Image (tube, grey):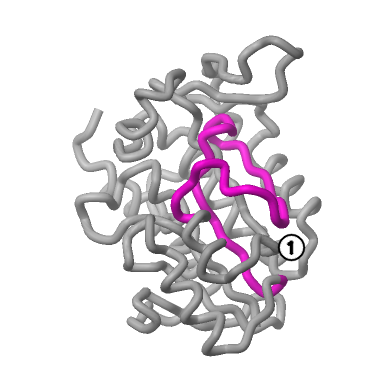
Amino acid sequence: MLLIAGLGNPGPKYAGNRHNIGFMAVDEIARQANFPAFSKKFSAEIAEGAIAGEKVLLVKPQTFMNDSGRSVGEAVRFYKLEPKDVVVIHDELDLAPGKLRVKTGGGHGGHNGLRSIDAHLATKDYRRVRLGIGHPGSKEAVTPHVLGDFAKVDREWLEPFLDAVARNAESLVKGEDALFMNKVSVATGGREEPAGAKGSAGSKSAPKGQSHIRQARSPKPSVKLPEKGPMAEMLKRMFGGKE
């Protein structure tokens, strides 16, 4: 069994937050893979199904971000899983909006959800799917940025990004991380930086001595967005009338 945990904060107050992109990704994976409705267990919302012939448990911890590890740890111990069987999907400040990276192990980078999981699993050797939300440009602006909602203009990159993550989850489940990253990049137009990165700064490798934070550019999206369908309706409800 593979456990895929999407990180976020529970409740409608936080539903549209950038910090909740992990929840959004897991919801879209569940929808596209025809998983049953989420139920409650392990202090989380969970759904069990199959992807690429493998049994997959989707987990959305309901313990709030800073205590995500308690929920993930309960599920890991119950199913007697190894670190290699765990994938955590989370928001990443140091990637431009719409960019994705997969890595195994490493530090938590100040992300409290990962910090909690490290502590409860007593290891860092699990896979992380880092979904870029961009950096606001200063340390003081980080908290309001991650706990702020995506703006309407963000739909231009967010919708095709989440769709691509879910549509190519088979490669992730098979452990084909490089292929997964490439497929998502191709599906979203291979943009260095996405359209609609309002109020966000993307980041990429910079020459030595320069800041890795730079203002995101806004090219037109190369993916035509559907005007109807479950994904469009979900994001329409999530964004509401926010500008």
Find residue 156 and report its horizontal and vertical position in percent. 46, 33
Q: Give the magenta range.
A: 84-113
Position of the C terminus, as image quadrant, is: top left
Query: Which of these two is toward me, 137 or 159?
Result: 137
Q: Is residue 84 left or right of residue 134?
A: right
**Disc 1 secondary structure class:** helix
User: What residue is drawn where x is 64% and y is 66%?
Assistant: 123
Find residue 209 and report its horizontal and vertical position in percent. 70, 10
Q: Give the total of numbered labels.
A: 1
Q: Does 134 appear in magenta?
A: no
The image quadrant of residue 45 is bottom left
Q: Amino acid at mark 1?
A: Ser
Q: Does 87 appear in magenta?
A: yes
Find residue 228 and report its horizontal and vertical position in percent. 38, 50
Q: Is residue 102 left or right of residue 113?
A: right
List the residue tagged with mark 1: 171
Q: Is residue 91 shown above or below 218?
A: below
User: What residue is drawn where x is 61% and y is 14%?
Assistant: 211
